[in-house]
Image: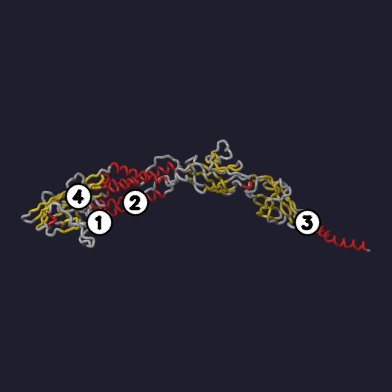
Amino acid sequence: MGTLTSVAALLMFLSPAAAFAADAGSDISRFDNVHLGTLVPAEIVGGAQVSIAGEILPIVSSVELCRESDVSCSQPYVLADDESTSNGIKFHVPAFVSPGWYRVRIQLDKGLNVYRYSSIQLNVKRAPPAIASLSTKTLYPRNTFNPLYDQLTIFGSAFASPKNNEVNTIRINGVPLVPCTPAPPAGAVCDGNLIVQGNDTAITVTGMPRTVEGPATLDVVVANQISNQVPLLLSGCAPYMPRVSAGGVLAGVVLLLFLLNRRKVTIPEGVVETPSARIPRWKTIFIDFDSNTYSLSRVQLVIWTFVALFGWVYLSVARSFVQGMVTFSDIPDGLPGVLVVSVGTSVAVGGVSAIRGGKSAGPFSPSISDLWSVGGIIAPERFQFFLWTLVGAVGFLVYTVALDPASIQNLPTLPNGFLQLAGISAAGYVGGKLVRKAGPILANVQKTVDTVANTITWTLVGSGLAQNATFALKLASATGFEEKPLLGAVAKADPASPDTDPTLFKKLTVTMSNPPENATVESYAPPSAPPKSSPTPPSVSVSATDSMHKRFFIIVNPDGQRAEWPY
């Protein structure tokens, strides 16, 4: 009885397992008609799509690749499928999948671990590396004298994968660049500073040696497969060198002119008795000696000459040293036209001055205000001509240095509109000289004192002197210069010395009765400085000792143009 009871209990315990096994067998049997067919294509490179034909396939979300050497498929690549139907499955094999032979399988039931394998194996070949872009198209040295280039990043796909023990080899013009350890292969260039790091989509190259300069090609070799070539410009100097070189050449030319012409001369040149000042000879390039003033047309010509020199050097250095294209650069379109306008203006001004008379002298010593004024008054046509000269020159320089030295082919072309405007501006400048009366220019002033009659007579020699002008003295004081009108002075023109205009003369005599004492003394000396607490006299004008002279005779024509001369 006891034995029968034990057997019954054992049967009751085993019956559920037997039932489960029977049920499992029936579940597995339902996949008996599921088959995977061939792979299309059966041989691919990483990144390609593969199709599997089949019959009565379940809808799945992933496909697994099992290495041929991994018999149990313990470490498969699990790939998401692109499309899953009962008749086939499509999926992509990523580029990071290691080359080799693979069995392709799908899992029919996750709970039962039921799989079906493809009838043939998939041969995955390594995709060749592909360069999409570079972090920069121009690689500059760390500095001009450093033997290494800046860091470069290469973007793309199918570069060396660290888990596959692959190595990226960078080539410049087909020559490999490799570290010096281990021993480099024949034909390669090695450098101990070279470091190549990255992953399968980006490579960072640090410490690239400057073995090649100029236009080059770059590619990447991985597992004996060569990527596409991309252009790379290897600069022979730092990006700031064209600007520094152009500025240095311009400064060198200016310094050379300064050193060769630093000997001082008197101005007006050759006048020893009453010179305006002693200045370095190089400044005389800017001076109109007829009026002893700075010449606007001369200044404009010098400015555009220096601008053209700067731009030409910048272009030549950029093309020769940055781009590696040694060349004798051309002058940009439009710039010769500006120089023609400048030279033509200078010639035209000289002709107008010969016909109409020269520019008014204004202050005795040349002043920067001579560039936009005539005889001490602002001339609109001179101001606009000076302004457009500065705008054009500065604009050309700024635009030039803003150009990338790695891509510059030519200097900026001056627009036709600017050339037309420069011509109109120059025409306005010359036209202003034509319509304006000649201003007074003094070449000498002599005084004669009659102590008996208590009069003083000044004899003025020059050009553009109006008989109905007004006169004054400009006297130095301890704190500046002050002007004192010569009230009651009577001018008489010399009829034998007419000028270009019937109202203007080349010689005047100005007589004044009861003149101030400081007008008659032989040598005028300014008074001593007032105490510091004393306020500055309101009659004192701006500059104090603008020359070596302390007393000047001033003539002011009716139109406001003036000139002065020491005596």
Disc 4 secondary structure class: loop
* First reached walking from the N terminus: tag 4 or tag 3: 3
**Camera sees residue 332:** no
Q: Distance between the residues labelled 4 and 1?
A: 18 Å
* First reached walking from the N terminus: tag 2 or tag 1: 1
Q: How far apart are marks 2 and 4 (CA)?
A: 30 Å
The residue sitting at the top extreme is 186
Mark seen at residue 378: 1
Mark 4 or 3: the one toward you: 4
Q: How far apart are marks 2 and 1 (CA)?
A: 21 Å
* First reached walking from the N terminus: tag 2 or tag 4: 4
Residue tagged by mark 4? 357
* First reached walking from the N terminus: tag 4 or tag 1: 4
Which amino acid type is marked by label 2?
Gly
Mark seen at residue 392: 2
Mark 3 or 1: the one toward you: 1
**Camera sees residue 546:** yes
> Is disc 2 in contact with disc 3, using a CB cutoff of under 8 Å?
no
Measured as percent of width and height from the top left, residue 493 is found at 11, 52
Residue 489 horizontal side relative to residue 5, left or right? left
Which amino acid type is marked by label 1?
Ile
The residue sitting at the left extreme is 452
Mark 2 or 3: the one toward you: 2
> Is disc 4 in contact with disc 3, using a CB cutoff of under 8 Å?
no
Residue tagged by mark 3? 30
Which amino acid type is marked by label 4?
Gly
Which amino acid type is marked by label 3?
Arg
Disc 2 secondary structure class: helix
For label 2, the crowd category at 10 Å Cα-Cα, with few meaning under 14, some 14 to 19 and many 20 or more, is: some
